Amino acid sequence: MDGVRFDIPDCPAGQVADLTQALGVSEPLAQVLVRRGFGDLTRARAFLAADESHPVEAFSGIEGVLAPILAHVRDGKRITVHGDYDVDGVCATTILVNALRRLGASVDWHLPDRADGYGLREQTVRDLHQRGTSLLITVDCGVASVEEISLARELGIEVVVTDHHSPRSDGVLPDAPIMHPRLCGYPCAELCAAAVAHKLTIALWQASGLDPAELDADLDLVALASIADVVELLGENRALTRRGIAELRRSVRPGVRALIGIAGLDPLAVDERAVGFALAPRLNAAGRLHTAAASLELLMTESHSRAVQLAAELDRCNRERRATEQGILIEAEAQVRELGPQAGYVLAGEGWHHGVIGIVAARIAERHNRPAVLIALEGERGRGSGRSIPAFDLLGGLTACAERLARYGGHRAAAGLEIEREQLPAFREAFAAHAAAVLSPEDMLPRERVDAIVTGPALGMALAEELCSLAPFGRGNPSVSLLVQGAHFEQVRAMGEGKHARFQVCSKGVRANAVAFGKGERPPVEEGLICDATFKLEVNEWRGACEPRLVLRHVLPSEPVLHDERGHDDPLQLELTLP
């Protein structure tokens, strides 16, 4: 059995019945809407429509952002777009550079090397001054670069900041026009950098008397970035990502087509999972291991043959990244075993590649349900990357240990740092102690949020297809978790060289096909033992045939079926009878 807790939010039967009737949806889908906070009919309709959009004028101070850009375009002075080396930064750079070129601007770009670290650097500012940059526009960085932007202004470079990261802890902002969804009061505060860049191009188009609809083709990059940067897929983010996935499927961008091809995907079947597990990792790989220049060129090239070459290069980088990641993961897990149970882990190693330690930190945090910081040591200094769990504020944890760190930044879920080697033992101890002080044992127990408790007649192709209307899935809108009560498993068989299992879920003599991925050749329950299990219901396509399939999430010992005050089974918590 899994060491997990099922969280089942309240689900008033009256709200479910109202939504079922008013929207013409199934009872399980209505349960999902109610349990996710969309029990109100108006909010439920808006969520299903996924068409929320806000005008660029909702960014306070947008006029101050536009004025220097339009002036430099008009005067033909050099503009440099300073991006970042991850998918979001590369996509944002591509969107803005292409738009400025279409407006006739003299524009180039700069992407930092991961070895130099994230964000705007003093030396970069001096280099840009030497090469004649007159206006510097930051994308996906800049809001914390107070001193660097002050230097740029001293050297005669105008600066515009577009970003979505947290400002400095002291609250000081750069002395420059800023376009930032949270700081500028934009209704969708969690836009990624590429979405901010897209909104900026819309504002530039409107100010230039052009039709912003011409920019819809850039939504493929907005979707790539939103999914890769794990922003909350609600509100306008959800609408932009859904539209962007549609653009990905029909994209004429040579780089996107080549990337889809090298990943072996059907363009018409691209969805958020394909982006997260196939496209984004390849775009990220070059920046993690070497330089993001190849990813940027891939997205900007108009040559199909060059796009194919670049996609193959990124594919090789991704294979290298995966091998590097696996080696570090093995060493990190060995350190976890050596340290023993802790509320938070700080793990460090010589020769660890700083470009992939963030991925491994995420693996450790997910496996052990503890915040984890991994540090790549080199000489007398180390660079670290951390990932957190829902109950722990990682940036707050680093702030509590700030006296041990040379530099740090990030947000609640992910952060980076630099540290002197001699401070590592003290930081490890302080971080674990802070985590132990703020996390309860319950916080460190994995939780599975249940969206609907299903009955047999609902578990078929109709529901599997209906649940697709809730996509795209991601942070803030996870894939739907269905609880099956009083089930048992039969006919368990290994698949995928023993890494996975397929079996049948049985309840009251009725069976449904299911799989368990990554749990070994047997799911975590004895065959025939009565249990409660959560599943994802999906449409499985294989060799041209489609069928509904349950994908196992978690298993617990079976709980008694709930009854209402009249002694009847609660209609929303009945034991499963599969069709």
Image (spheres, helix red, strand yellow):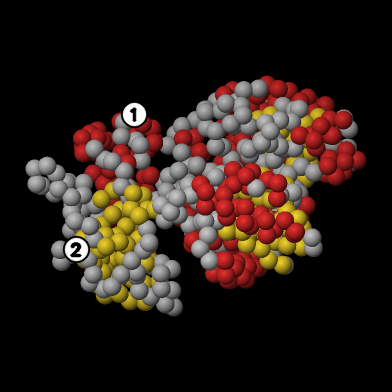
Say if 240 sits above or below 268 in the image: above
User: Mark 1 Cα within 10 Å, few/some/many (few <14, many 20+)?
Assistant: few
**Residue at label 1?**
42
Seen as rendered, the residue at the extreme left is 566
Residue 485 position by quadrant: bottom left
User: Mark 2 Cα within 10 Å, few/some/many (few <14, many 20+)?
Assistant: many
User: Which residue is at a point 49% across and 61% down the rendered structure image?
Assistant: 368
Circle number at residue 507: 2
Q: How many marks?
A: 2
Residue 16, horizontal then vertical, whole percent: 24, 38
Give the quarter of the figure containing the C terminus.
bottom left
Residue 527, horizontal then vertical, whole percent: 26, 73
Give amino acid for label 2. Answer: Ser
User: Which residue is at a point 21% across and 39% down the rendered structure image?
Assistant: 13
Judged left or right of residue 136, residue 240 is left
Q: Secondary structure at mark 2?
A: strand
Say if 474 sits above or below 206 in the image: below
Give the quarter of the figure containing the N terminus.
bottom left
Give amino acid for label 1. Answer: Thr
Residue 556 or 112: which is nearer the viewer? 556
Disc 2 versus disc 1: nearer the observer = 2
Residue 236, horizontal then vertical, whole percent: 49, 35
